[in-house]
Image (cartoon, rainbow, N blue to C red):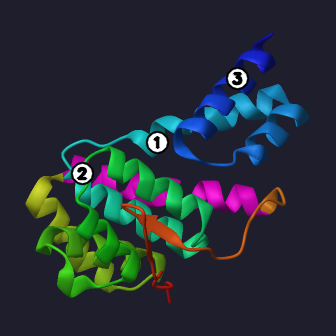
Amino acid sequence: MLKRFIRSRLGKYERDLGYDATYLRDVLDADLGAFLRFARLQGVSTYRRDAPKDVWYAAKIVGAMSEDCGPCTQLVVTMAERDGVDGATLAAIVRGDLAALPAEVALGVRFARAVLAHDPAADELREEIVRAWGKRALVSISFSLVSARLYPTLKYAMGHGRACQRVLVGGAPIAVAHAS
């Protein structure tokens, strides 16, 4: 009964966001307990306190792009669009065009890139984030970055990863800047 309910919710999620969640069904089919444990991580992926929405999504998009420039990145962009993040900002994040971003969003992108690269520059950027928005914002941005990498990694591990595909912002294809 619970599995049927979860399958129904996954189907709605797929239809609403244009996203293939077959990998989640595979987890559910293998072990309901494993699925429920994984589902608990959803709270981490949606936690946003004190961080500006566009900065939070910027880190999430950079994280998704580092693992997958296809369906998962598109999912995060779609969620950001629906949450009211400006399309020009989203396009600049996906293109990797820091000059086209508001300063605070560029800070989020630079921080996410530095963290992913294990670059010591992350220390100074982290301090800027804490000065600007506080420690709770840092936790929010950090969670967005971590969670954005979690789903593509699971998809690839489960055999559902897909090679790069175009990402649409406002219905227009955007060239994806690949993380280095």
The answer for how far apart the CA atoms under marks 1 and 2 are is 15 Å
Amino acid at the residue labelled 2:
Lys
Of the two numbered discs 1 and 2 in the rendering, the one whose residue sits closer to the viewer: 2
* Residue 44 badge: 1
Of the two numbered discs 3 and 2 in the rendering, the one whose residue sits closer to the viewer: 3
Q: Residue at x 43, y 53 (%)?
A: 78
State which region is magenta: 135-156
Residue 85, position in %: x, y? Answer: 25, 54
The answer for how far apart the CA atoms under marks 3 and 1 are is 23 Å
* Residue 8 badge: 3
Disc 3: CA contacts within 10 A as few (<14), some (14-19) or many (>=20): few
Q: In what element is the residue under mark 3?
A: helix
Residue 116, position in %: x, y? Answer: 47, 76
Amino acid at the residue labelled 1:
Val
Q: Which residue is mark 2?
A: 53
Within the magenta stretch, is there residue 91? no
Marks 1 and 2, the one that precedes in the sequence? 1
Residue 1, position in %: x, y? Answer: 81, 9
Marks 3 and 2, the one that precedes in the sequence? 3
Of the two numbered discs 3 and 1 in the rendering, the one whose residue sits closer to the viewer: 3
Q: Is residue 36 above or below residue 150?
A: above
Amino acid at the residue labelled 3:
Ser
Q: Residue at x 71, y 55 (%)?
A: 154
Helix, strand or loop for the magenta stretch, by majority: helix
Furthest-front residue in this view: 171
Q: Position of 28 compared to 10: left or right?
A: right
Marks 3 and 1, the one that precedes in the sequence? 3
The answer for how far apart the CA atoms under marks 3 and 2 are is 29 Å
Within the magenta stretch, is there residue 142? yes
Q: In what element is the residue under mark 2?
A: helix
